Amino acid sequence: MGKVVSLDNLLASMEARRTDVAPWLGALLGEAGEKFAHLGLPNRRVEAWRYSDLAKALHESVKLEADADAPPEFPGACLAAFENGVLVDKLSSYCAMGAISLRKALAQQDPAVAAHIGKINPQQDHPIVNLNTALMEEGLVLHVPRDVTMATPLHLRFNWSDVETQGDDGRHLRLLVVLEEGASATIFESHDGAPSFATIVSEFRLAANSSLRHIRLENFAAAARQTAVTLAEIGEKATYRGFYLSQGGHFARHEALLKLAGEQSFAEMDGAYLVADKRHCDNTTVVTHAAPNTASKQTFRGVLAGAGRGVYQGCVQVEQAAQKTDAKQLSRALLLSHRAEIVTKPELEIFADDVKCSHGATAGELDANALFFLRARGIPEAQARALLVEAFLAEALDTIGDEVLRAPAAEMVRKWLARHAGEASHVE
């Protein structure tokens, strides 16, 4: 059975974590721990967590089942292999691209880490960011020098296979990526298995004219409980492109909190979620336009079967100085079951007067006319419905572009459709 995670255990671990560390780190951990202790674990009384009650999920004992696929492999990529929340050097090759483990960077009191960690698009009262900061030990640090293009992707492989080694307070990992001016990199995250409880916070700083491609695949088992936060500051003429694919878990939530801090910066997020059985998947985004002539685009597509539950909360914030902002936001959901549930909450907060901002949300069943078209050409009903679902998701997958990077996502979709052909063949 999955472990019950208590607030008392988390607070006790925070107190122990602050001993025998550098003064600057102790101050950072202590401040984050105090803020977390004041706020506690987020629950439905917190507006941003109204549809995803983490406190409740952590107090539930869940049944562990061997229903996870093997992690994807990327021959030629630099690998950082995390097994049950621990970075395993003998399985990894991340050093080839100049990355170092967070544990080593903190032990060496790396000044570059001290200058950036906890300071990229800071979220002062965010419970998960504070929890993660107070307990972070494992993780990875990548610094890409000026005008350097990393030809090889960095594969961050998070595999969770043994709940007994994950600790009573879970595992809390931190990623720090700094791209200097004109630099570019590709980061691919794969999440497999069932973390008893894990938090992952990624901090990305993109200097002027830099670019980052970021792909996340959450191929969790049904018992997984994880919440992740992606923080990014995007400088002048810099570009962030993110693709997120998840099949949920007992509790799976990913937040992308992006700040367009420089003029002519651009952020694009495309996401897809496939939620069946009684799984829960939450995608929450906040894009802050803080400079003039910035643009953002986010499109999320969801397919829900059985008693699956999906949440999409998308917020665009336009500050007063961010004139000429162009922001687009779209959510589309496909319901394959009358028991499935989708919650969509788009928001616009605009304090500038010369902007182009739009949002839209749709939810419904498969197109009856398209289904009739395929059936009239001799395609069996179950196959016709599965083809329509696959076509719906293909629009999201095509945004990845690179065929090598797209292949694991396409395979994940194919396996999910094979498992849930029954839901795809009729509306329950």
Image: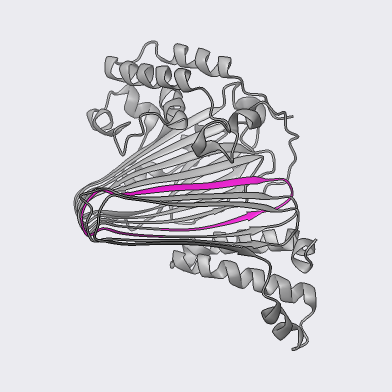
Which of 85/295 is in front?
295
Residue under the image location 45 percent in, 22 percent down: 36
Where, quadrant-wise, is the N terminus in this rendering?
Answer: top right
Queried whether the magenta region covers residue 279, the answer comes back as yes
Question: Which residues fall within the magenta stretch?
Answer: 269-297
In the picture shown, does residue 332 fall above or below 94?
Answer: below
Q: Looking at this rendering, what residue extends furthest in the front direction?
A: 353
Which of 405/17 is in front?
17
In the picture shown, does residue 371 fall above or below 347?
Answer: below
Which of 138/50 is in front?
50
Q: x, y percentage for residue 395? A: 52, 70
Asked whether, in this view, residue 16 is left or right of residue 26, the answer is right
Which of 312/174 is in front?
312
Queried whether the magenta region covers residue 416, the answer comes back as no
Residue under the image location 20 percent in, 52 percent down: 208
The answer to which quarter of the image holds residue 3 is: top right
Q: x, y percentage for residue 82? A: 51, 37
Number of numbered discs visible in the structure rendering = 0
Task: Assign the magenta stretch its main secondary structure.
Answer: strand
Q: Say whether residue 136 is visible.
A: no
Where, quadrant-wise, is the C terminus in this rendering?
Answer: bottom right
Q: x, y percentage for residue 189? A: 48, 48
Colouring scheme, one of rainbow, by chain, secondary structure, one colour: one colour
Q: x, y percentage for residue 403? A: 48, 68
Q: Say whether residue 262 is visible.
A: yes
The answer to which quarter of the image holds residue 203 is: top left
In the picture shown, does residue 90 fall above or below 339?
Answer: above
Residue under the image location 23 percent in, 53 percent down: 322
